[in-house]
Amino acid sequence: MTETVLPFVARHVGPRLEDERAMLAALGLPSMETLITQAVPASIRLNRALDLPAPLSEADALAELSDIMGRNVVKKSFIGAGYHGVHTPPVIQRNLFENPAWYTAYTPYQSEISQGRLELLFHFQTLVAELTGLPVACASLLDEATAVAEAIGVACRHHRDKRSRILLAGDLHPQAIDVVNTRAEPLGWQIETGSEVDDNTAAVVVPWPDTRGVYGDFAKVIADAKAKGALVIAVADPLALTIMEAPASWGADMAVGSMQRYGVPMGFGGPHAAYLAVSEPLTRIIPGRIVGQSVDAHGRAAYRLALQTREQHIRRDKATSNICTAQALLANMAASFAIWHGPAGLQAIATRVAGLAARFAAALKAAGVEIAGESLFDTVTVKVAGKAAAIAGEAEKGNRLIRIIDADTVGVTFDETSTDDDLSQLASLFGAKAGEGDKVLVPGKGRGEGFLTQEVFHSHRSETEMMRFLRRLADKDLALDRAMIPLGSCTMKLNAAAEMMPVSWNSVANMHPFAPAAHTAGYAKMTSDLEAWLCEVTGFAGVSLQPNAGSQGEYAGLLAIRHYHQARGEGHRNICLIPSSAHGTNPASASMAGMNVVVVNCRPDGDIDIDDLKAKAEKHRDNLAAFMITYPSTYGVFEEGIKAFCEIVHDNGGQVYFDGANLNALVGLARLCDIGADVCHMNLHKTFCIPHGGGGPGVGPIGVAKHLVPYLPGHVEIGSEHAVSAAPFGSASILVITWMYIRMMGGAGLKKATEMAVLNANYVAHRLKDAYPILYTGAHDRVAHECIVDTRVLKDSAGVTVEDVAKRLIDYGFHAPTMSWPVAGTLMIEPTESEPKLEIDRLCDAMIAIAAEAKKVADGVWPADDNPLANAPHTASDTLASEWTHLYTREEAVFPAGALNGGDFDPTAKYWPPVSRVDNVGGDRNLICSCPPVAAYG
């Protein structure tokens, strides 16, 4: 064993032992156990240690995982089917993908401290809009298969759900069909293949190219769709679109696809960013986040999230989708890839790939071998009359993997990493000899040079320029590498370097998700370990790692409940009880799963109203499907009646779904299945250390009780159905992060992390209670792992809004806590276990100082419309203005922290926001979500 000075748990947990003792003393408590006894109901406490492997040091855990993943056999993939080999530019890998300034950031709800990643996501949207010819693109979706399903949902909403027939006009990838069929069943969509469009057709889905690599002739079906009012959805390869006509030019109303081949490794299935672009009339009904351009308080251009009223946190069961976390980090990688190569470089890559495929096709035809189609981009489908397995076996001997479509058919897909030697060796498998040439076989007149004319795609060809471009963007943002991000219900804890390192390993990054099972033993072992450990942590009998976001975990869990009821002849059960305090994803997911939402009231103290729950469960007992609950509650409290809630639901025929958003307060202290849960999703990007990436990736596996195990998600590639993600293990490559975390923490370490999270939150509540009311507490006046600070008192006394407080915290160097959720006008603070006491005190000092500043407004020292809170945040350029007309000083504006802790403040550590307060309303009224081409300025 490698000896280290401190075990990993001591590196992960922020407060030192003396800090822990000081915080407990401040709370008037003799020990941690006393706090946990007061905060956590005795009825749910786990009375034994978690049965997990003993913790390893960072070095030993890395060595063990390296050995496990070394069991993978990494061969060059020509399987295709939506996943491709790539060359990730090292400048992007090192300066973005492996850079905590990028991967530890949160979703950019606070625009002023998120300008860097918002700008790059804006460039991503511009890239997608240019490739597709469609004016509006969102800032990524989860994967190509779910993007197809989401686009179909847009079409149905466009027709106000009066049309239900979806026509698949060509051969989509099997995983896309699987995901679409899963989505269709509870929503009543009729999925059909063919070319006959009728008056009930909501959408026609056109693969471009199809899974065989062929570009079909869809002119008639597109014309028929237009005549009948159906929308046309193109599923298009974005690399092919660099040399082909944009889908909008031939009639597409929407386009979707995967941006994986823009520099993002296959990763055994993910994570990768999908794209969705639409015509202008569909803008307000699309899913996912949209970055828009607005202005700040001084008229400077600024970016922000636009049209948020479409989203689940506002519209709940009426939202356009349940999507919350998307794939921001991977979208930023894709945008950076396009910026690095520029349009000419992208076209060169695409032309070379298409040329290899064309030469391969020509060689096979010359040898008398039958291939599918005449127009193709990167894939050649070959008829081999019962020899598919044998030919694939010969390819494997040469360290190449090709796709077995059926016993008589194989597919060969070329990509950016393919070489002339690969072409020659693959051609020889079919008795053919590849020739020279640069002819490509893509249809149409081609793209030409008039795309991606925006300056950003032409200005960063040297590595020095690109490195500094990414640094300038990162410097605009505030991520965990600079300060704590105390967002309630978001668990912004440490993402340790040792946890992150394996994601870039060749054995992790470069595996195709459909590689033969004999080649994926490392992934099989790692995922098996993780499933077993998560079962032990939660008490469940089975786990699926497939859902690639918490929202998808909710959806998968509710589908498991739906299928369970159907299997028992009770498919009529469609009522889902949801507390009024629930996360917005809950009702949105319930609606997607075909359930009707009935809201359960909460009492004034924040607890669920057990009488209302009982009355509604009994009223709907014949149709009750599920009850969704977050525990601890979204108000940050352990509700004493949780077991009684579960019993009421079970007595009335329903299943209990636990939202795992607050699992960081339970690990090692209680197990959800023991409490009464039938299913729960776990946010690995919260509790188990996968970083948030500025809005994704995330992983939302579900755990289920024994009776629900048969209804976990399947996948067409492993012989079953009901997939919720494109790949069998979803975002598989980042599962190694959670594996490393659990392996280094062990059972005792995980419990210690939970205890420290609870202690830190209670310490924050104690420190702030004299300046602000703490809105909800449980028994013994304790909170769980987060607390709600009621800033409405400042509004009442001084007219200072919660937004003023949030923006003023930026001047103090902090990302604001969760704002106006779950209670309007409040802040919810979650410090996590990873923040040191010094940083926690710094936040508390800032909050107390802001209350004092508000008092100055209330007392008339500062005008209500001209004070540091109303004008926050303050930029460097604002402060350097030649004329200063405010009644507060420049120092009070930008160095308020200098007056704290006896003036012990390092001004060189100051975070400077790049913009002043952003105009949200103006940004929605004048939506700009991509950069116009240069010609637009002529």
Image (tube, grey):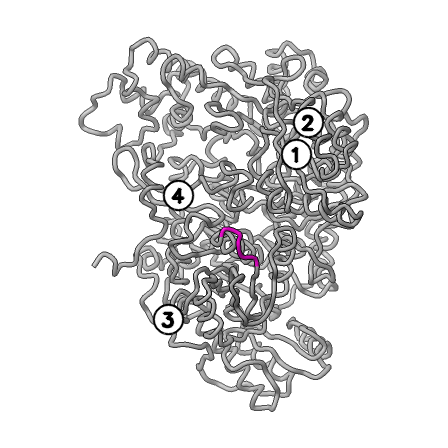
Question: What residue does disc 1 label?
Answer: 577
Give the amino acid at mark 3: Arg
Cα–Cα gap, marks 3 and 1: 52 Å
Cα–Cα gap, marks 4 and 3: 30 Å
The secondary element bearing badge 4 is classed as: helix
Mark 1–mark 2 contact, CB under 8 Å?
A: yes
Cα–Cα gap, marks 1 and 2: 8 Å
The secondary element bearing badge 1 is classed as: strand
Sequence-earlier tag: 4 or 3: 4
**Spot occupied by residue 579 in the image (x, y as percentages of width and height):** 62, 30
Sequence-earlier tag: 1 or 2: 1
Residue at the spot 69% in from the left edge and 11% down from the top edge: 30
The secondary element bearing badge 2 is classed as: helix
Magenta span covers which residues? 160-164
The secondary element bearing badge 3 is classed as: loop
Give the amino acid at mark 4: Gly
Report the quarter where the N terminus lies. top right
Cα–Cα gap, marks 2 and 4: 45 Å
**Spot occupied by residue 335 in the image (x, y as percentages of width and height):** 43, 55
Question: Would residue 737 be found to the left or right of residue 90 on screen?
Answer: right
Question: What residue does disc 2 label?
Answer: 613
Sequence-earlier tag: 3 or 2: 3
Question: What residue does disc 3 label?
Answer: 447
Label 2 environment density (alpha carbons within 10 Å; few <14, some 14–19, many ≥20): many
Whether 450 is among the magenta residues is no
Q: With respect to residue 36, does 707 lie above or below?
A: below
Mark 3–mark 2 contact, CB under 8 Å?
A: no
Question: What residue does disc 4 label?
Answer: 116
